[in-house]
Amino acid sequence: MRKETETMHRVNRIFRHPLWQGAMAQIEEAEKDRIYCRHDLTHLLDTARLAYIENLEKNLGLSKELIYAAALLHDIGRGLEYAQGIPHDEAGRGLAGTILRDTGFCDAECKDILQAVSSHRSKGCQSERGLAGLLYRSDKGSRNCFYCKHEDTCKWSEEKKNKEIKG
């Protein structure tokens, strides 16, 4: 069995990739005055960690590397959404595809991750047991609305807001 550090080498390549770093810088600049949840590395890692915990608890059998890759890439299109009006799930698919190929993911892995990135906003996948459903639930679950001082003016519907800590 490979050591855990060895199994995450492609994930580490993702955040070192110039396209990922450029996209994250664009998002950071666009969100510098944002008072609501940001789409920064903290959010991406919170999403990954929640997804990995659910994966273990429900014995879904998904690899840690695929989960973290999908989480690191799911909001990568936000900068293009802010700048050009392209929905970030669509914009993110193109950026993520390039990054995944450059960082050593095979075609089957790319397909699964890109499907998850493309559908992470689709409520229709929320009950799926695969990577797309896992990413959807973890992305939404990563938001601490119950502790946000701006929750009362947030545009999220009340049904979407996380009003309690869930385990």
Image (cartoon, helix red, strand yellow):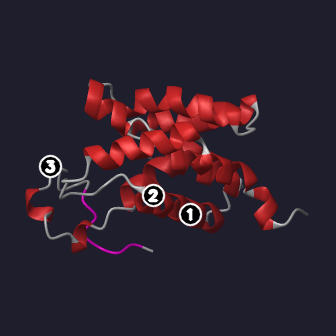
Q: Residues within 10 Å of mark 1 (few under 14, many from 20)?
A: some
Residue denoted by label 1? 54
Q: Pick whichever, 59 or 47, lies toward us.
A: 47
Task: Residue lying at the far left in this picture: please name it.
Answer: 153
17 up-or-down from 59: above or below: above
Labels 1 & 3 near each other (Cβ < 8 A) = no
> How packed is label 2: few (under 14 Cα within 10 Å), some, or many (20 or more)?
some
Nearest-to-viewer mark from 1 and 3: 3
Q: What amino acid is found at the position of numbered circle 3 in the picture? A: Lys
Closer mark to the observer between disc 3 and disc 2: 2
Q: In the rendered image of this protein, does residue 40 appear above or below residue 46?
A: above
Instruction: Answer whether labels 3 and 2 touch (C-beta < 8 Å).
Output: no
Residue 100, quarter of picture? top right
Indicate left or right for 56 with 137 as reference: right
| Helix, strand or loop under label 2 | helix
Outermost right residue: 1
Q: Residue at x 68, y 57 (%)?
A: 64
Cα–Cα span, label 2 and label 1: 20 Å
Magenta-highlighted residues: 161-166
Instruction: Indicate the amino acid at tag 1.
Output: Glu
Q: CA distance from mark 1 to mark 3?
A: 27 Å
Viewer-proximal residue among 80 and 87:
80
Determine crowd level at label 3: few under 14, some 14-19, many 20+ residues with C-alpha closer than 10 A: few
Q: Residue tagged by mark 2? A: 41
Between discs 1 and 3, the one toward the N terminus? 1
Amino acid type, label 2 = Leu
Residue 94 horizontal/vertical position (percent): 51, 26
For label 3, the residue is 155
Q: Is residue 144 left or right of residue 111?
A: left
Looking at the figure, which quarter contains the C terminus?
bottom left
